[in-house]
Amino acid sequence: MKICFYALREFDELYFCNKFKEQYKIDFVNTSDYPVINKNIELARGSDGVSCTPCDMSAKMLEAFHDVGVRYILCRSIGYDHVDLKRAKELGMKVDNVSYTPTGVADYAIMLMLACTRRFAHILKRVELQDYSLKNKLGRDFSQRTIGVLGTGKIGATVIKHLSGFGCKILAYDLYENEEVKKYAEYASLDKIFEQADIITLHMNANDANYHVINKENLEKMKDGVIIVNTARGKLIDSDALIWGIETAKVGGAALDVLEFENGLYYYNLTGEVMLNRRLAILRSFPNVIISPHTAFYTEEDVGAMVEGNFRSLLDFESGAKASGFEN
């Protein structure tokens, strides 16, 4: 058995690949480049599966991999919305994702909430300029805030459990209510959360039903000065509506670890290049917006779990067992 790893980071993921190669007796080849048709697809010939972080997995890309004998698409991520699942099924290619401990993303989200509430990013920028004055640095007491958590899967539920120690009022939304979550939060409708929450944090899947759940219509329902935090998927927020919200002061702050149209942007070193993503350029210009490049997951524990998840998925597919993550 063999996996072809694309976009493999030699400074962290390669270590885990070598570790799990021995443990699972599965060989691998790798490149730091993303898959590109007519460039490096041939590298996957002889491999049972290909592994990649979110990238182009359109019908044409899947067909190119299928032509060199690949049978499995192993997403090195929780999200799999970048894969054309319909075409994969037509080609007989199985798709799987990975899971990892929810604490890394959950705690990162809480960190962003705290940073926005206390204007911490702005304070740090001012300190770099040796501006130690207090004007425009006034924060708010986090414990007195009402937090709306959209999505109570593993990560959202962990956010709620960890938030409970701060004394916040917590409102939660999910189509499927979690009894454990009810110990710490009150389930409510989206409209109620939009009307009452001081901070809204997103932990939903990216699907048609949740697309642009944060849009202009819903922003208009929210409190003036609401804080928006997104560590889930960029498609959950209409970027143009968010920019409108910040410019009109409807939104008092935002922290975005993910961004709409981030493909081709994260995880590249674009130092010195012209920024082609206008929305990102505008958002970065606001003093009350924090941008981080899809790094909420990035802990030693989670990186190891993602790489191991691909090895386990291939082993499960080949043995006929149900894969550990999502499976199409």
Image: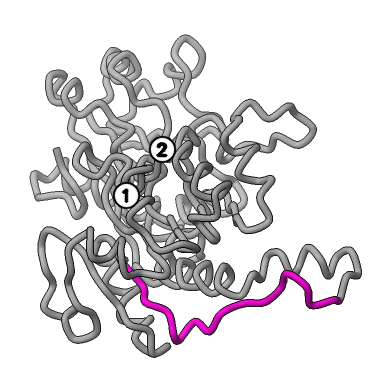
Q: Is residue 47 visible?
A: yes
Judging by the rendered image, the residue that carries numbered circle 2 is 54
Q: Report which quarter residue 207 is drawn in.
A: top left
- Quadrant housing the C terminus: top left
Q: Say which residue appears at 59% left-offset and 46% top-offset.
A: 10
- Report the span colored magenta: 133-148
Judging by the rendered image, the residue that carries numbered circle 1 is 218
Q: Report which quarter residue 128 is drawn in.
A: bottom right
Q: Can residue 153 be seen in this view?
A: no
How far apart are the two marked residues, 2 and 1, measured between alpha carbons? 28 Å
Verify whether residue 172 appears in magenta. no
Residue nearest the viewer, comparing 218 with 57: 218
Q: Position of residue 36 (x, y in %)?
A: 47, 18
Verify whether residue 134 appears in magenta. yes
Residue nearest the viewer, comparing 288 with 236: 288
Q: Position of residue 238 (x, y in %)?
A: 40, 39
Q: Which amino acid does label 2 sit on?
A: Pro
